[in-house]
Image (tube, rainbow, N blue to C red):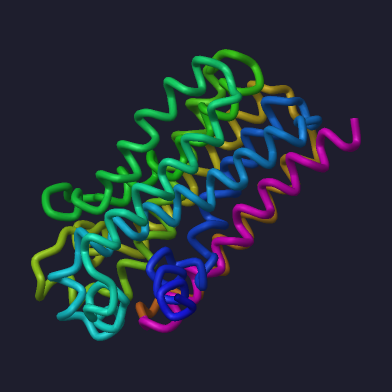
Amino acid sequence: MTERLRLYWELARLHRPIGILLLLWPTLWAVWIAAAGEPAWQIVLIFALGTVLMRSAGCVINDYADRDIDKHVKRTRDRPLTSGKVSTREALLLAAGLALLAFLLVLPLNRLTLLLSVPAVFLAASYPFTKRFLAIPQAYLGIAFGFGIPMAFAATQGSVPAVAWVLLAANIFWCIAYDTEYAMVDRDDDIHLGIHSSALFFGRYDVLAVMACYAIALTLLAVAGLMLGLGLAYFVGLAVAQGIAFYHYTLIMDRQRELCFKAFLHNNWFGAAVFAGIAAEYLLR
């Protein structure tokens, strides 16, 4: 049993929390903004746990969708499902169980949040299959990773204001930026296997595209701040995030696989900088 649990833990990618953090930060942006800096602890707990559960379910579905592809990639061939240590039936049951737990978490919330949870689950479950036909599946991932934003506003305010969709749009472009950095690591494998990715779509303009997406994300975050009447602390947070984006440029400019992966991992600090600006802004009021 201990060995099975370890394999399930790895299948859900819980030993690699970067995906959880990249999903959690934009959710926390929305939770804090929707509550004007004073979110109910129950809301914070529900959305934090829901983030962990849905990201884990998404990883399991991703490995299920790519089980015949991952065996041809050195980095992924030893994953529990690809290597045969976990069966497809076990994987599907695990994904369903994690999604069910996430759904149970939102049951105490209002009707609008419950309704929004339906497309949230669909987006998380369907993303792994978009690599077969979407030129930039990272954009779809950005919607899936950012859907906690409208849900957070719905849970707190009972509605989804325009600023929530601006924040979601910002998250989409941020997601394209960091996941393109990730895709630059697997570019050769994706070409060989015929998988779509933003790194292949942008081609030799991939570095320029990454920086353009960072710029658009930061611009949309600035627009959101102006819509909300946020002040200096928030924009200092955005300035720090901008500096982090420039640092990522120094990492990816030569397209070295290890440095591109380092840039991807470092995006945790981009999300944290934006959240720190939001939290500080409301704390200082």
Q: Dividing the image into 4 quarters, which one contains the N terminus?
A: bottom left
Location of residue 229 in the rendering, given as x and y in whole percent from the top left corner: 73, 23
132 up-or-down from 277: above or below: below
Q: Magenta includes 134?
A: no
**Left or right: residue 189 compared with residue 266:** left
- Magenta stretch? 256-285
Q: Magenta includes 283?
A: yes
Q: Dividing the image into 4 quarters, which one contains the C terminus?
A: top right
**Left or right: residue 217 compared with residue 203:** right
Q: Which residue lies furthest to the right in this view?
A: 284
200 up-or-down from 238: above or below: below
Q: Nearer the viewer, residue 86 or 148?
A: 86
Q: Nearer the viewer, residue 62 or 171?
A: 62
Q: Nearer the viewer, residue 91 or 127?
A: 91
Q: Which residue lies furthest to the front in this view?
A: 1
Location of residue 109 in the rendering, given as x and y in whole percent from the top left corner: 59, 23
**Left or right: residue 67 compared with residue 99:** left
Q: Give the dominant element type of the magenta stretch: helix, strand or loop.
A: helix
Q: Residue at x 19, y 57 (%)?
A: 201
**Left or right: residue 62 compared with residue 37:** left
* Residue 265 visible within the image: yes
182 up-or-down from 152: above or below: below
Location of residue 238 in the rendering, given as x and y in whole percent from the top left corner: 66, 47
Q: How many labels does the image show?
A: 0
Q: Residue at x 69, y 53 (%)?
A: 273
Location of residue 190 (image quadrant)? bottom left
* Residue 205 visible within the image: no
Q: Which residue is drawn at 82% across and 42% down?
A: 280
143 up-or-down from 166: above or below: below
Q: Residue at x 56, y 20 (%)?
A: 154
Location of residue 33 in the rendering, given as x and y in whole percent from the top left corner: 69, 30
